Image (tube, rainbow, N blue to C red):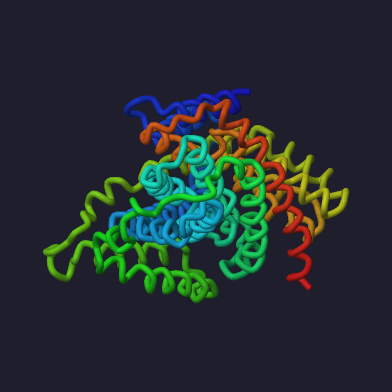
Amino acid sequence: MLALAIFIVTLTLVIWQPKGLGIGWSAIGGALVALTFGVVQPADIGIVWNIVWDATFTFVALIIISLILDDAGFFGWAALHVAKFGNGKGRLLFPMIVILGAFISAFFANDGAALLLTPIVIAILLRLDFSPKSALAFIIATGFIADTASLPLITSNLVNIVSANYFDIGFGRYASVMVPVNIVSVLATLLVLWLVYARHIPKHYSTANLSSPQSAIKDPLVFRAAFPLLALLLLAYFATESLGIAISLVTGAAALLLMSIAGRWWQGGRSAIISVSSVLRKAPWQIVLFSIGMYLVVYGLGNAGLTAYGAQILNWLGQRGNIVATLGTGFLSAIVASVMNNMPSTLIGALAIDHAQVPAATQELMIYANVIGNDLGPKFTPIGSLATLLWLHVLAEKNYKISWVQYMKIGLVITPPVLLATLLALVFWLPIING
């Protein structure tokens, strides 16, 4: 009960975010209380740090890359191209915005998609003079695709990195399983969004007020470097997998290279257009404190018996065939994530799966189902993921306020069918690639 009380208070502070107390300090405070009362031991700090450090610094490096590219105009350029390619047809623009969100989520993580694409889409919608109901359809689509399309690569979501590192899954192996599954997730998301919002999407829109995509480019040098750098980064992930090099080191090297280009370091900073120091200040350093603090609090829950209880449930599911095991694990993870946030939920699920006594093939399905549940399931509630909290914060800053009740009505309609389709795709695909 003490471990649960510490967790609830810590999560409340993380979500509430009292003024001057970021998510990191709230989580560290909870961890210190857990250490003080013996819920976790000092030795657990090393165990938890070993689980989270690579994921945490990979995330920070990806956000730094995203912020620099955003300052260079990369995402604005892409969004304006999409609006132009829509050719004045609203029902063509809608799926194109969803697909753009899916690509950004895949390569720049779900938090990057929520943080960077949302304000750009809102700015374009204002220029297109869409009605409030039409604008809401595109805004909801942008927010939901950020999470539902965050499956394909290990780096697409913090959940993926933590899970892959915990179970020692390589970059190539993970992609071979999840890229096809992610395609199903994106298509299912698009279909459900279309069924819900098609009547609100305008048939036609005027492109007269849209700027040229080239006008969005603020730093041509960084912009020209973007595509080669991203291609090189993706190749490096595959190339370094067999060498055992941490993903955060590869991503960090790419971030450092892009920082040097943006800051014109070889010229001593002369002619730099983007302020690298400003980008570094905006980087989510609080996530480092949040990861170690929150995971220590959750580890205390595991020590108090939650892991054993979870393993019992998974054992029961595993005895009822692969379909039941996969769907059960995925939906269970989704419900837990929607209640306690997907970051702590991921660790609880991983610990429980590791302790479950099930066949190897079933365990592998459960591992990926846990990832899917924690990537997609948080959309049930606003507190399910940091990406959703970021997205709602960005909307509030742009005077688009979505209440928690309104959000949950949408989430409960959209999420279950997408989650079901994605989990069924996993059940079908994984045995195929395993031969």
- Is residue 166 something one can see in this rendering? yes
Q: Position of residue 340 (x, y in %)?
A: 59, 33
For the point 54% across and 53% down, which residue is it? 98
Q: Position of residue 337 (x, y in %)?
A: 62, 38
Residue 188 higher or lower than 132, as above or below: below
295 horizontally vs 395: left or right: right
Front residue of 143 and 124: 124
Residue 177 is left or right of residue 92, and the answer is right
Q: Quadrant of the N terminus?
A: top right
Q: Is residue 115 visible?
A: no
Q: Residue at x 77, y 48 (%)?
A: 327
- 172 relative to 121, above or below: below
Foreground residue, 150 or 292?
150
Name the quadrant containing residue 212: bottom left
Q: Quadrant of the C terminus?
A: bottom right
Q: Is residue 80 left or right of residue 334?
A: left
